[in-house]
Image (tube, grey):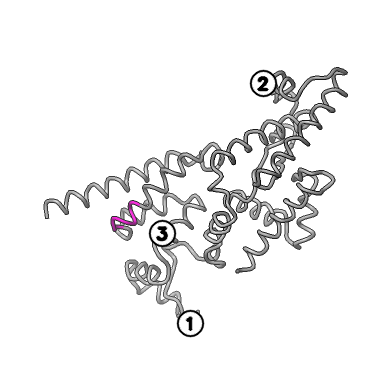
Amino acid sequence: MGQKIKTAIELADMIKEENLNGRDKIPNTETHIKIWCSHFARDEKDIRKILDDLKEAKYIFVVNIVMPDPNLYLPAANSFVYTEIGILNDLKRFADNRLEKIYESTFYKRKSPFQITRELFPKIKEFNNTPMGKAINESVMIDEYIRVLTNSAFEYTPERKLAALKEIYSDESADDIPDVEAQTVQNVRAVDQVKAKENEPENTQWKKITNNFPVDFLVRIHFRKYEFEVVKKLITQGKIRTEDDLKYIRDTLQTMEGRTVQDPILKRHMNEMVELRRLAQAKLNFLRTRSKTG
């Protein structure tokens, strides 16, 4: 098991331990990011990247408790909960109890968590970056995540989560792989690399890259970096042209288009994804027509 996977699992376990036995129960970026940075001797950017990977691998759910406000120089803040139904049920009770206490101390009257959220959630922006707003968001979203986990429990088994994490870190040096168009022959001496790139046809470079890495692996890297134009270029240049690879791109994009609600950055690339999916489908149609007429 690589070091990145071990580090990610250790952070997931720390979140789980906090959910079970911690004083705060529901750790968030305001209270715990510096603790995690110190523990792993990593900067905040690295820790946030690991948290994103844990979310993608379904080890944790993320609750947005503070919406960013550029006018007030207010950054977003998130809470983190481990994806186990028993933990979520306990945290739901904890979050509801905290919400009731905050509501009572603010409005000097008692209401159930359901009544509170029904009354105040439609006005959640008014409570942004307040204890009330954070408590409402946690109560509502944990309840939603309980439904998600109950309805899709098979996606959150330890085996599935570990497999997903291994795929994310399928090559520990994947983030260091240059863009496909800049990749040169491996094991060439550094002093010869520039000359090799100048003299070697692009298709030869691509062939040597795909001898070392499968096409779907290279595509996944580009998709994680939102580099849809790179993949489009590879298709239009005929470097990605097999039916299996084109189907993989089309099907993966269809799945990603359904995740734009959870990933605001991905949503910005919706037009690029749709255009690339249509291109892949058009190439597939061409291949199938040619095979019938051939």
Question: Which residue is label 3 attached to?
Answer: 216
Distance between mark 2 and mark 3 Cα atoms: 43 Å
Question: Which residue is label 1 attached to?
Answer: 189
Q: Identity of the amino acid at label 1?
A: Arg
Q: Residue at x 79, y 59 (%)?
A: 38
Earlier-in-chain disc, 1 versus 2: 2
| Other-residue count near label 2 (Cα within 10 Å), few / some / many at <14 / 14–19 / ≥20 | few
- Front in this rendered view, residue 128 or 163: 163
Quadrant where the C terminus sits is bottom left
197, above or below 217, in the image: below
Q: Identity of the amino acid at label 2?
A: Pro
Residue 65 drawn at (x, y percent): 71, 36
Residue 46 drawn at (x, y percent): 67, 57
- Front in this rendered view, residue 286 or 206: 286
270, above or below 55, in the image: above
Distance between mark 1 and mark 3 Cα atoms: 28 Å
Which structural element holds mark 2? Answer: helix
Earlier-in-chain disc, 1 versus 3: 1
Distance between mark 1 and mark 2 Cα atoms: 63 Å
Residue 192 drawn at (x, y percent): 45, 80
Q: Residue at x 16, y 52 (%)?
A: 290
In the rendered structure, find residue 122 and report the number of the disc placed on it: 2
Region rendered in magenta? 241-247
Which structural element holds mark 3? Answer: helix
Q: Identity of the amino acid at label 3?
A: Asp
Q: Which quadrant would residue 117 be assigned to in this image?
A: top right
Is residue 186 in view from this perspective?
yes
Taking the image as shown, residue 195 lies to the left or right of residue 101, namely left
Taking the image as shown, residue 213 lies to the left or right of residue 29, namely left
Q: Which quadrant would residue 165 be assigned to in this image?
A: bottom right
| Magenta stretch holds residue 243 | yes
